[in-house]
Image (cartoon, helix red, strand yellow):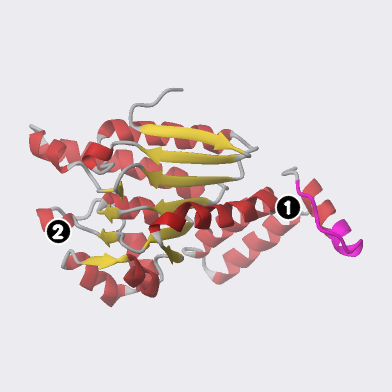
Amino acid sequence: MKYETLQISIKDDIAYILLNRPERLNSFDIKLGEELYSALKEIHKKQEIRAVVLKGTGKGFCGGGDVKEMYDAEDKSKFLSDLTKAIHRCVIEMRTMEKPVIAAVNGAAFGAGLSLALACDIIIAVKNAKLGTAFIGIGLAPGCGTQFFTKLVGYQKACEYILTSKTFTAEEAQQLGIVNKVIDADKLDDAVEEFVSKFKKLPPIAVGKAKMLINKSLDNDMIAHLELESMTASLSAASDDFNEGVTAFVEKRKPVFKGK
């Protein structure tokens, strides 16, 4: 499928998604939201894909919602409702797919762009990247991202950064626990590939189920989560990968996982 706002490539069982509206800092409009959701759904269905990398073209990762389109909209309330729902569908798809999603934050990530990065499982950012929730700065209540941000940084810090629309650096984001790794811009792709190479070798079923458990742990009570862990471990024990993993352990060799 051809996309107007994205570039999609699949290489060695890894899906690479490039947000491709560089003239608008890859900001979200309805078209980008629809196309990104469609691409994520297709990737979700492909069992052979082991991980997803999300990056922006040009100077930014994603500048958030397209403010020019907000300005031009005749019915601004309806436009924001439609836009946030389009973004939410992408966030839900990213968090519920049982594949790791890596954000390669190559530049600015503001508003919905920061929310998109926070929906990823691993975030690698370049040193000169600027981040911020941004919504308050244009007189808008946040349309996404407040739950992820608050759970990561805590209540007081969330209030400081969200309520004052504070802009911060990639290194500050790492100190807050938002970003996994900060890297020089010319080394971003190599840093991403370091993670990608791990997921190419790890058992994708177990990785996917572990991601699901991590997400469920944010809301489950202890007893319910322990039961879910037990059930999930039992289900994954029926996989060929588990048989390969324990066999390789006993035979003192490296396992070769095939995602079955």
- At x 46%, y 33%, the residue is 8
If the image is split into quadrants, where does the C terminus sit?
top right
Quarter of the view holding residue 229: bottom right
Q: Quadrant of residue 232?
A: bottom right
Residue type at mark 1 is Ser
* Region rendered in magenta: 246-257
Front residue of 114/157: it is 114
**85 horizontally vs 212: left or right:** left
Q: Which residue is mark 1?
A: 236
22 above or below 167? above
Along the line of sight, the residue nearer the viewer: 211 or 122: 122
Near mark 2 (Cα within 10 A), the count class, few <14, some 14-19 or many ≥20, is some
The amino acid at mark 2 is Ile
Residue 44 locus on image (x, y percent):
54, 38
Characterize the local packing of mark 1: few (<14), some (14-19) or many (20 or more) Cα atoms within 10 angstroms: some
Taking the image as shown, residue 212 lies to the left or right of residue 257, namely: left
**Percent position (x, y) of residue 83?**
25, 39
Mark closer to the observer (1, 2): 2
Horizontally, is 139 left or right of 80 in the view?
left
| Viewer-closest of 18 and 178 | 18
Residue with the mark numbered 2: 136
Alpha carbon of mark 1 to alpha carbon of mark 2: how far? 45 Å
Q: Nearer the viewer, residue 221 or 81?
A: 81
